[in-house]
Amino acid sequence: MTAPGNTVDLMLARGQSLALGANFGPDLAPNGQRWREVFGGAANPGALMLTGLRRADGVAVTHVANPLLAGYDPVVPAAGYGPMLVQGSVPEGAVLACAMLRDRLAGAVAFQFHDAGGQSIQNLDDDPGSGAEGVVTPHANAELWLAEAVRVFAAEGKAIRVPRIFLNQGEADVARPRGWWSAAAEVTCGQMVEQVRRRTGQAEAPVLFVQQTGGYMMGAATNLHHCKLDQLDFVRAKGGVLVGPLYPYKIDNSDDKGVHKLWSEYVRAYEVGAWAAAEVAAGRAWNLLPGPATRTGDRIAIPVSVREDQALTTAPGLYADYGGDPEHLGLEVTGGGAIIAAGVAGGTILLDVAGPVTAVRYAMQRDPTDYRRLTDAAGCGYGAHRGLIRSTLTRTVSWGAMEFALERWLPSFEVAL
């Protein structure tokens, strides 16, 4: 086949199981298609994958949710390329590729998932001395795939570019101390950028888009999720884009792991990433980040980087049937004081407090409740970290004749006073 246009974007959507996505099984979309076909290359011309690759165990790589930790056979080259095929899991990169084509951010996009579920950020680097059991397979997967993609598309005279790297990782590192994740990500993401430049020859570094870790339905009292705060630091330091937090998305707890999202929520979260990419490409600011907190008397103000076309708003009742909304919109204070009232005005969070306050936290509760036991009849619920503040900016997209409502939520954060 021939790829449309003269340039092919290579989609790098890295991470662990939340980047691998949900298995939609045989479920049909309202338009009668299977969901895996809705996000496949046949329904989305220009969504591509390499063909002919094999795993190290000899199994043919026939769809985009492979090779995982089996890795590629390094002596088997790609035979060519064809329409992106989705079977089983629908990875983040597949949804993003289709959305990029729809939004005209690319004329052709090639994708393959390089990583696997349960992987620490260190398992995505090339150092066998870091991470679990010396895992370097994800890095090697990306290395081979990038090299083969450049070779295959260059043979047709196509230009290659990697404008973005999406990272959806952190659940494996929720017990790490403050600063650990950002230091490890400095190495891992630096290697991803170096790999892209070396393999493609492009001078410009891809823009890094980060999903903030959502966390689990349990264990919040002991696993303090410092990686969430590190992710904010990392985005600020690297000039990256914080797609948004994963805490507002409903969890399908049918596996009792308390972390994997409902299939439709994966689509919504992934689509917010595509929305962020479109806004950034149009030159519009995206990051929704808290600024320094100030206290005047008993009033604390925290400015948030909202644009002129939006404001902060609240969404009471989101968790009403799942253990209840958090107090004070999900805001807490440390230092011995207490919150009397909490609200938003324009682009500012306002707290009325009593007593000494040393810091304000949002959607970072240290709650011992096991919310896996507070689900609906379908076994779905929400994580232990809960917040009710989002932006007024919304978007609706449609796949398979089903509409998905997209919202911009305030990330989990902690600011000192």
Image (cartoon, grey):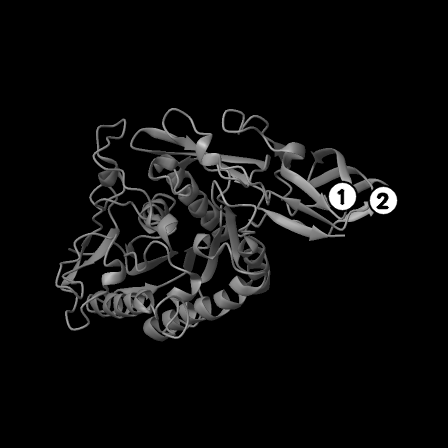
Q: Which residue is depicted at the point 20% across and 52% down?
A: 63
Three-letter code, disc 2: Thr
Query: Can residue 291 be seen in the rendering of this structure?
Result: no
Give the amino acid type for the residue marked by disc 1 in the picture: Ala
Which is nearer the eye, 274 or 268?
268
| Residue 165 in picture, x, y percent from top left | 41, 59
* In the rendered image, the vertical position of residue 127 relative to residue 163, given as above or below: below
Q: Position of residue 298 (x, y in %)?
A: 84, 40
Q: In the rendered structure, find residue 301 and report the number of the disc placed on it.
A: 1
Q: Quadrant of residue 31?
A: top left
* Relative depth, front residue between 311 and 390: 390
Query: Does the image show residue 322?
Result: yes
Q: Quadrant of the N terminus?
A: bottom left
Q: Position of residue 93 (x, y in %)?
A: 34, 51
* Dot 1: element: strand
| Residue found at x 35% / y 43% | 102
Question: Viewed as shown, does residue 217 lie left or right of 338?
Answer: left
Q: Are marks 2 and 1 in contact (CB under 8 Å)?
A: yes
Q: Is residue 108 left or right of residue 125?
A: left
Residue 220 location (% of width, % of height): 54, 45
Residue, x 39% and y 43% (percent of image)?
257
Mark 1 crowdedness (10 Å alpha carbons): few <14, some 14-19, many ≥20:
some
What's the distance in space between the residues labelled 2 and 1, CA to CA?
8 Å
Q: Image height check: is 12 above or below 264?
A: below
Which SS class for mark 2? strand
At horizontal 54% and vertical 64% (from top left) the residue drawn is 180
Q: Nearer the viewer, residue 132 or 8?
A: 132
Residue marked by disc 2? 296
Q: Quadrant of residue 205?
A: bottom left
Classed neighbour count for the residue bearing mark 2: other residues with Cα under 10 Å, few (<14), some (14–19), many (≥20):
few
Q: Earlier in the sequence, mark 2 or mark 1?
A: 2
